[in-house]
Image: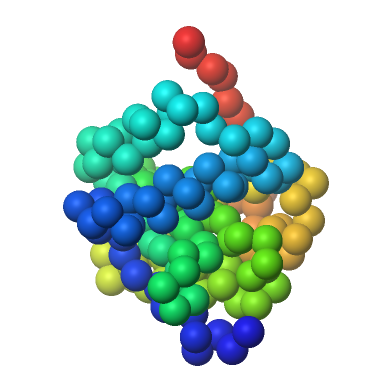
Amino acid sequence: MDPSRIAIVEADLERDAHRRAVTELVDAYAADPMGRGAPLSEDVLRRLVPGLREQPGTLILLAYNQDRPIGIAVCFRGFSTFAARPLINIHDLAVVPEFRGCGVGKSLLQAVEAKARESGCCKVTLEVQERNHRARRAYESAGFAQAVHAQEAGGALFMSKPVE
C-alpha cells in the first residue's frame, strides 16, 4: 500500500463514524493475541466512548484508507514531574491485520509525535508486550527505547495492579 493513501485524523467523538471506528478498532485490538486475546464485553463496548469522553486528556488518532478505518492510537496527555512539561502516553496503538507492514503504524506514531511537539511535550511514552516483536521493532525504528532515568537504577518497568 502506498503510504500517501493513509489519512490520519484526530477523532471527534461527537461524530458517529469516529465513535464506531474507535469501538471497532479497540475491540479488534483487544481480540488480537498481542492485545488481550479476547474481544471486549458488551458492557465495556457500551462504556468505552463515554469513558473516553470523560477523560480530559484523551487524544485519539485514526488512520484511514479511503473511508475505511485501519488503525488507531489511543493516547492520554500527562505530565512529567522530572521535566515539568506535558507528555503524551500512547495507551493503545493498533493496525488491522491486513494493513500491517504498510506504514500505518509508522504514520500514527509520526502523527502522535507531531501532536506532542505542537503541545510542548517533553516525550511520548508507550508500553508494549515483551513478546510483541513486530511492534517492538516498529517502536525502536521510530526512536523508542526502554526508559532509563539513572543508569545505576536500570531500565524502567511497566507494572500493573488490578483494583476491582
Q: In the rendered image, which quarter contains the N terminus?
A: bottom right
Q: Does residue 28 appear left or right of residue 137 in this picture?
A: left
x 53%, y 33%: residue: 40
Query: Quick check: 162 above or below 18?
Result: above
Which x, y percent locates residue 107? 51, 75
Would you place residue 90 above or below residue 55 in this image?
A: below
**Side of 25 where 61 appears, left or right:** left
Q: Quadrant of residue 155?
A: top right
Across and down, in percent, residue 77 comes to: 33, 49
Corner quadrant of residue 61: bottom left
Q: Is residue 66 above or below residue 120?
A: below
The residue at the point 64 percent across, 40 percent down is 31
Q: How is the image coloured?
A: rainbow
Q: Is residue 92 visible?
A: yes
Note whether 142 is above or below 36 in the view shown: below
On the rendered structure, is 131 left or right of 117? right
Q: Nearer the viewer, residue 100 or 81?
A: 100
For residue 158, side relative to residue 78 (left or right): right
Q: Position of residue 19 (x, y in %)?
A: 33, 50
Q: Nearer the viewer, residue 152 or 135?
A: 135
Q: Residue at x 59, y 89 (%)?
A: 2
